[in-house]
Image (cartoon, helix red, strand yellow):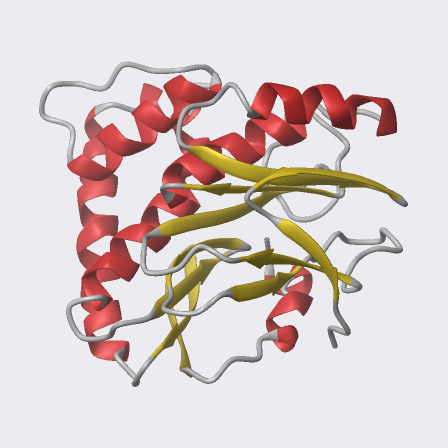
Amino acid sequence: MRDEARTYRRWLRNELSQFGVRIDESDLMISAERPLRELAERALLLVRADLESYVCEDPGFVSALRPYEVRPEAPGIAREMAEAARLCEVGPMAAVAGAVAEYVGRALLAETKQVIVENGGDIFLYSTRPRTAAIYAGSSPLSGRLGLKMELVERPLGLCTSSGTVGPSLSFGKADAAIVLANSAALADAAASALGNRVQSAEDIQPALEYLQTIPGVLGGAAIIGEHLGAWGEVELVRVAAG
């Protein structure tokens, strides 16, 4: 999502220290127990260098819209993206924002017991307490009025969002928000894309959520189109007053 689509960042409220890190297309908002900007910048530079070096040698990795087999010399982030894409039947770049957020977040866990890394609406988190994320769903009347509560604690999680109506990311669906909670942010990102691709109308929400349940490592999800919504799994929709 571009800057004009980052309204949701004004909704950020937690007890942690917040700071931003931006390098080229990567624009992260991070919450941690103390400011760790320099460490986050180093981690982001390293993971971007790994990925940029690889895609120069294997440009098909970027353009693929279906699962893609990476080369043996592919760095860890490319392999994780490719595996998430395989599980979700999408291209590996559908997992890039979540994967980058997770790599930076894991680096920060060496210096903080809690971390939340948001990258264009895609989140990696490790928290010692339950968290609630307000849902940004563009022009839907439910945008900013509902939150997704996560009770799972002291474990790495990915919470990612895809949209067919908000932001520049490619989607073949019309969901205002397709949100997925998973064991990793790369998987959550790819699965959110797969969920969003399957929602063209309100009638598609339930079968799309049923498809989500077949993906190993996915813990739950929700989909919104207009005033219609559905949810499944380890997530609880709650009322919030974002803004």
Give 201 or 7, whichever is nearer the viewer: 201
- Report if residue 90 is visible in the image: no
List x then y, in percent, for residue 216: 41, 24
- Report if residue 87 is visible in the image: yes
Q: Is residue 34 above or below residue 122?
A: below
How many marks on residues?
0
Q: Is residue 93 above or below residue 184?
A: above
Q: Is residue 130 above or below residue 203?
A: below
The residue sitting at 49% across, 65% down in the picture is 130
Q: Please tell me in which quadrant of the rendered image residue 84 appears.
A: top left
The residue sitting at 40% across, 31% down in the picture is 217
List x then y, in percent, for residue 189: 47, 39
List x then y, in percent, for residue 177: 70, 44
Q: Please tell me in which quadrant of the rendered image residue 168 appears.
A: top right
Q: Is residue 200 left or right of residue 77?
A: right
List x then y, in percent, for residue 3: 61, 64
The residue sitting at 44% across, 55% down in the picture is 152
Check the picture and name the quadrant holding the C terminus: bottom right
Q: Is residue 147 above or below residue 10?
A: above
Give 26 or 99, whichever is nearer the viewer: 99
The residue sitting at 15% across, 35% down in the picture is 75
Q: Is residue 74 left or right of residue 215?
A: left
| Residue that lies at the very extreme toward the left in this rendered image | 73
Q: Is residue 73 left or right of residue 56?
A: left
